[in-house]
């Protein structure tokens, strides 16, 4: 698991001893370049920084945890898959979970090595990350590869994280144990607002490199958002596809209901034993209303308002 320290090189152990640290209910977090990581994940970040060699056609799907990563992965896979086959029976999404098909750079591929074997990836290679943009960006060094970021209302992210953690630990964790660190900006991959702003600013600077998507918009207008994603990724829907209902079919294929009903997503697990089923829950906008007190809501709203202040980012 990410919060262990059993994967660290001697250099990383030395580095860690000089970094600001914070202990949460899972273990120690370390602040590296403004972002908080559990030790094994930090090793993955360092390996990535050292060893990743971008290809021009690479696609990186980025998010803060619980913001719609699984959905974005499924949609991206389905968009490219439709160029290979027009049948939805026997689809690749039925044989593997989106996280198996689009692995994380720092939490999977580069977790143990700065030179992993990436030969099984065909072009375009699709990877994912929870790193903030300023860290992701380093090895990309001006490569024209594309980054898609999905952002979600922080209050729903918090509630989703609470369910996810509780499912893992097989007991209901205290909401406070996640709420407080989130507000202080010390949670895993936090601060949340710095994360969002790093990609938001990146997308304003170079809209051809970064597409900024929002979970809430994907929910309210999936067809329009999937078309936007397809265009950005350079595989827009043809007129014929638009007319024959292909866009809606793809949206339906990747719907929470459809994916969560698939055998693979009920029986499978990630390489580090996280049941795929825990990535699918309600998928609603505003579920926080059932779980957060008004006081908690107000506190988060105030922080976000301050942090997003003059960024032009609405919440
Ligand atoms: P909830 O816990 O609010 O239901 P991530 O994929 O980044 O881990 O985020 C998980 C959240 O996305 C969960 O939110 C989950 O239900 C939701 N989700 C997963 N697959 C989805 C899909 N295909 N469509 C919409 N939401 C989805």
Image (cartoon, grey):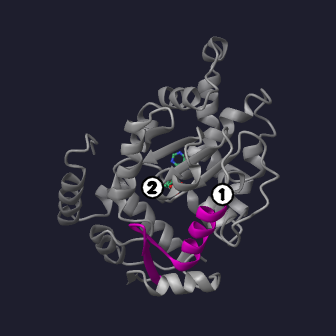
Where in the figure is residue 312, as x and y percent of width and height?
A: 25, 40
**Residue drawn where x is 53% and y is 55% of the image:** 138
* Residue 137 falls inside the magenta stretch: no
Where in the figure is residue 225, as x and y percent of width and height?
A: 48, 31
Q: Which residue is mark 2?
A: 134
Looking at the rendered structure, the number of numbered marks drawn on it comes to 2
**Residue drawn where x is 50% and y is 67% of the image:** 164
Q: Is residue 254 visible?
A: no
Front residue of 89 and 66 = 66
Front residue of 13 and 5 = 13
Figure quadrant of residue 159 = bottom left
Where in the figure is residue 39, as x and y percent of width and height?
A: 54, 79
**Residue drawn where x is 67% and y is 57% of the image:** 103
Circle number at residue 168: none
Q: Quadrant of the C terminus?
A: top left
Q: Quadrant of the N terminus?
A: bottom right
Where in the figure is residue 26, as x and y percent of width and height?
A: 47, 82
Circle number at residue 52: 1
Q: Secondary structure at mark 1?
A: loop
Bounds of the magenta span?
Answer: 26-52
* Residue 46 falls inside the magenta stretch: yes
Figure quadrant of residue 181 = bottom left
CA distance separating discs 2 and 1: 15 Å
Which of pointers 2 and 1 lies earlier in the amino acid sequence?
1
Q: Residues within 10 Å of mark 1 (few under 14, many from 20)?
A: some
């Amino acid at each position: 698991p990410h919060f262990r320290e059993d994967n660290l090189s001697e250099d990383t152990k030395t580095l860690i001893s000089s970094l600001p640290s914070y202990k949460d209910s899972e273990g120690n977090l370390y602040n590296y370049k403004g972002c908080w990581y559990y030790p094994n994940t930090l090793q993955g970040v360092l390996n990535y920084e050292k060893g990743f060699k971008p290809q021009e056609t690479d696609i990186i799907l980025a998010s803060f945890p619980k913001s719609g990563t699984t959905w974005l992965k499924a949609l991206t896979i389905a968009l490219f898959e439709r160029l290979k086959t027009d049948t939805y029976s026997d689809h690749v999404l039925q044989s593997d979970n989106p996280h198996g098909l689009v692995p994380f750079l720092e939490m999977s591929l580069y977790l143990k090595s700065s030179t992993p074997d990436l030969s099984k990836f065909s072009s375009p290679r699709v990877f994912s990350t929870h790193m903030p943009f300023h860290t992701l960006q380093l090895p990309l060094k001006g490569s024209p590869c594309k980054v898609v970021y999905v952002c979600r209302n922080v209050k729903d992210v918090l509630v989703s994280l609470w369910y996810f953690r509780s499912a893992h630990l097989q007991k209901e964790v205290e909401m406070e144990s996640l709420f407080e660190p989130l507000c202080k900006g010390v949670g895993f991959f936090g601060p949340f607002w710095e994360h969002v702003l790093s990609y938001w600013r990146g997308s304003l600077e170079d809209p051809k490199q970064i597409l900024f998507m929002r979970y809430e918009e994907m929910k309210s207008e999936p067809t329009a958002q999937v078309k936007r994603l397809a265009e950005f990724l350079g595989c827009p829907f043809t007129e014929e596809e638009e007319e024959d209902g292909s866009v809606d079919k793809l949206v339906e294929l990747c719907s929470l209901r459809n994916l969560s009903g698939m055998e693979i997503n009920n029986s499978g697990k990630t390489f580090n034993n996280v049941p795929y089923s825990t990535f699918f829950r309600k998928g609603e906008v505003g579920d926080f209303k059932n779980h957060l007190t008004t006081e908690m809501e107000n506190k988060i709203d105030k922080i976000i308002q301050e942090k997003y202040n003059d960024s032009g980012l609405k919440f």
